[in-house]
Image (tube, rainbow, N blue to C red):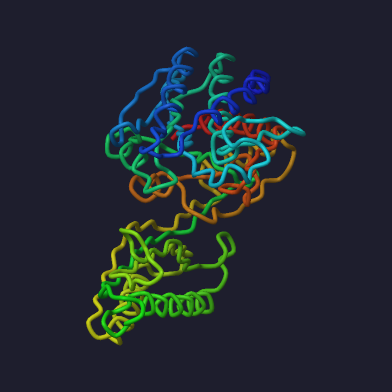
Amino acid sequence: MERVLRYVDAELLVELTRSLIRIDSVYRPERGTGEAGVARYVTELLEAWGFSVRVEEAAPGRPNVLAELCGTREGKTLLFEAHSDVVTEGDASLWTYPPFEGVVVDNRIYGRGACDTKGNLAAAMVALKAIKDAAADFGGRILLAVPVDEEGLMIGIKKMIESGWCNEVDGAIICEPEENQLCIAQKGALRIGIRAHGKMAHGAIPRAGINPITPVCRMVARLAELERSEGAHHGEDPLVGWPSITPTIFLAPPSGEPQINVIPNQAYVTLDVRTTPRQDHGFLKEAVLNIAREEADKVPGLRVETAVIDDRPCTYTPPDDPVVQAAAEAVRLVTGREPQYNGVPGATDGTFLWAWKGIPIVTFGAGKREVPHQVDEYVDIPELIETARLYAAAAMIFLSTRR
């Protein structure tokens, strides 16, 4: 083990993280950016390091990458997962440092994806390289999955599963910014769209039209009441916290040019519903539908549609599962601390590994939990180095035992 940890190259880790940040992988087809640049860079590097690599598109121009390192004998399979996409930088003028340059200041790397999750992708790559370069003796194999679209509808990991790339995996480490706390649970997620169809008219003659905005606003107000009711009924989960119902997009009209003196023909709102293990997704979907219908029925001529855009269950892996135990032992070995257990406040690609394939997952990595998706995203270099060592140690511990 000590030999493997000595091979974790801190300088390579920092430069690799910076190089990944410099590749704009926000999915913006209209600008020609997306995950392809990261996939190409990661593939070329891993192949140069001697890894076996597979590439397959989840959608045109959106390639998944899977690298494999085989041990010296039969054994278990451990999967590391780190996505290649990042969220938008927003208004770049608000950043202290350019979002796609990977600037290093005061032992931190700044840039979009620094902690979510290009730094952790780099940590997993450097960990696997250390195991390979140390000629470590282990049974089984290690996989590194680099899927697209984790920040969207997770088409990347879904495609990997459908293609059989995740078959016979015994445990997975999801590489996400969790301050190296071991997250053994994740919130569920429902994404729901509500579209109200009214009638376009002049703003000065409202009775000539049917304004869809007001009833949708009433729906949103009632959904806030539903959120409070669910919180009161189910309480705070010890690992993932409170449930929430959050309106995230409001468009009126959803297409065409809005004008201040025109009543739009439609209003559209999306809901990001985050659930705890005790909640019932079926009940929530029905509750949202009922609220939408009841408010629509109050406005003659108004028609409403609801659509479930995405439905992701909560996940839970018990602390005594081998992949969690391996991560916990790695924390003790590398840091001298007792592991801290927590839950992921959102959802990750691990949701589908757990739900579709029954793969036990544990999520951990470098980065403050509140920093992802913010302006001036960063990762602390000492924590990132620790993460690479944790990944290497956890892999060796997990693969030292039989199925």
Q: Nearer the viewer, residue 39 or 328?
A: 39
Q: Is residue 343 left or right of residue 299?
A: right
Please tell me whether residue 10 is drawn above or below residue 312 in the rendered image.
above
Q: Quadrant of residue 54?
A: top left
Please tell me whether residue 246 is drawn above or below residue 377 in the rendered image.
below
Please tell me whether residue 252 is drawn above or below residue 180 in the rendered image.
below
Kindly identify the residue that appears in the image at 33 percent across and 68 percent down: 194
- x and y percent of residue 280 in the render? 39, 69
Q: Nearer the viewer, residue 372 or 169?
A: 372
- x and y percent of residue 281 in the render? 37, 67
Q: Is residue 209 left or right of residue 244?
A: left
Quarter placement of the C terminus? top left
Number of numbered callouts drawn: 0
Quarter placement of the N terminus? top right
Please tell me whether residue 180 is drawn above or below residue 239 in the rendered image.
above
Q: Is residue 324 left or right of residue 30?
A: right
Kindly identify the residue that appears in the image at 33 percent across and 75 percent down: 212
- x and y percent of residue 94 in the render? 63, 46
Q: Is residue 281 left or right of residue 127?
A: left
Q: Quadrant of residue 61?
A: top left
Q: Nearer the viewer, residue 246 or 159?
A: 246
Question: Which residue lies most toward the right here?
Answer: 106
Q: Quadrant of residue 395?
A: top right
Kindly identify the residue that appears in the image at 44 percent across and 15 percent down: 47
